[in-house]
Amino acid sequence: MRAARPKALQQRVPFGEAVRERRLPNGARFFVLENHLNPTVAVSGGLAAGAIFAPQDRRLIASVTAEELMKGSERRTKLEIAEELEGCGASLSFSTDSSDLVGVDIGGAALSRDCDRLLDTIVEVLRMPVFPAEELEKEKKRLVGSIRQAQDQTAQRAYEAASRAIYPEGHPFRRRTADERVARVEALTREDLRTFYVERYGAATLQLVVVGDVEAVRLLDGLEDRLADWVGGPGPAFPPVSVPPPAPGSQTVVMPEKASADVVLAQPADLVRTAPDYVACTLANSALGQSSLTSRLGVRVRDVEGLTYGIHSSFTAGKIPGPFTVTLTVKPESRDAAVASTLDEIARFRKQGMTATELAHEKSSRIGKFQVDLASNAGIADAIDASLYYGFGVSYLDEYPSLVARVTREQANDAFRRRVNPSLFMIASAGTF
């Protein structure tokens, strides 16, 4: 009889084959991956109830609604829900991400033996929130304090100024002034949250991914029993968001008695996560400025010239295209030199492109990080959830390393070059000058 192969040498079953799924008539979708290597379970998921669906002048309703879901249900108070989770060492959260204006994220974890308790709580919170008035008042005070406190941060002020300069009134990526945001927070009512909940929350866009030491069929049956009768709710479609033309220029926000200053270079970009050249474009950006320690910008502006404490470039690219930004923290007297050096390096990178060595390094790093992220139930659940959220399907996780490996230098350089032009940046600074 042939000896069994060591686990480390056994062939992993492709995600496309291992993940079990179930779709309900009301639109809800459930995905389960059995992983019996440790007695834990992770849940990742969400639904389409982000800021893009809120009234244009009150986008924050979406984030507050998500945050307040855990503040009490028709069955239990906030404290009782918290005690239930803490009593079994479980965690659960509902949140929105400022870079993703479409979805509300659901994240949870527990020991496998407490999986049903976690799922019961998820369903209870999703289906029976009450949005207690006293809890909303506490949250409003916290938000107002947070907004006011952030106004003392140079990075926050520079980014806000840049966003208002490159995006027109009404655009979801335009940041309102602190006074405008405070006014909108103070005007929030329980009825606003309840109305948004009724309009947007439902099974039609619900997606839950469960990974861990569970039995897939039993778990899928349980989710169906809990959610089959939940009303469908609205579909996932959202209004189109245009990409405005660049708005080059400069602005300075003067803030007294600041030892350091922050600078944001920004321009609108059309990159979304589903773009065919997304991987190529972000590989190029990784070489340019993802890391303050090893990127082109980091090595030149920070290490060689000593003009910045830190420098970073990134695309905001979810379902809705956001800005391309470069952020720097500098001594006020070094601002102009640091900006000039940054613009020159971006122009050089745009003209010459990344080298073959840089591309090989970024590919290896991207694939390695992807594989490390899949070392835990939570990482696997998040990866499956993201792949499904963007419409790629579960098998995309099996294909991703080869997709990265196939990117050519020409593809990466072209994808970046078409989206970034250093002569078109809005440059916003905040500090004591």
Image: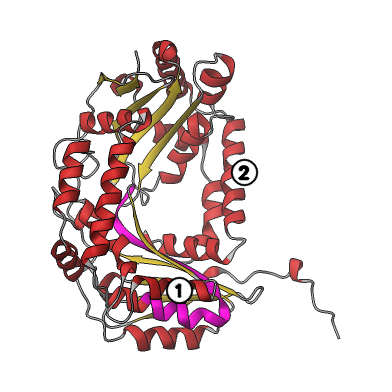
Answer left or right for 264 relative to 284: left
Answer left or right for 166 relative to 24: left
Q: Is residue 417 above or below residue 216?
A: above
Badge number at residue 270: none
* Three-letter amino acid code of the residue under disc 1: Glu
Q: Nearer the viewer, residue 191 or 38?
A: 191
Residue 351 in sight here: yes
Quadrant that contains the N terminus: bottom right
Per the image, the residue denoted by label 2 is 364
Point 23% across, 31% down: residue: 166
Q: Is residue 1 above or below residue 132?
A: below
Quadrant that contains the C terminus: top left
Other-residue count near label 1 (Cα within 10 Å), few / some / many at <14 / 14–19 / ≥20 = few
Picture coordinates of residue 108, whole percent (x, y): 46, 68
Answer left or right for 392 relative to 204: right
Point 59% across, 49% down: residue: 369
Residues drawn in magenta: 99-122
Picture coordinates of residue 110, whole percent (x, y): 53, 73
Point 50% across, 36% down: residue: 286
Per the image, the residue denoted by label 1 is 83
Point 46% across, 45% down: residue: 279
The structure's colour scheme is: secondary structure
Q: Earlier in the sequence, mark 2 or mark 1?
A: 1
Q: Secondary structure at mark 2?
A: helix
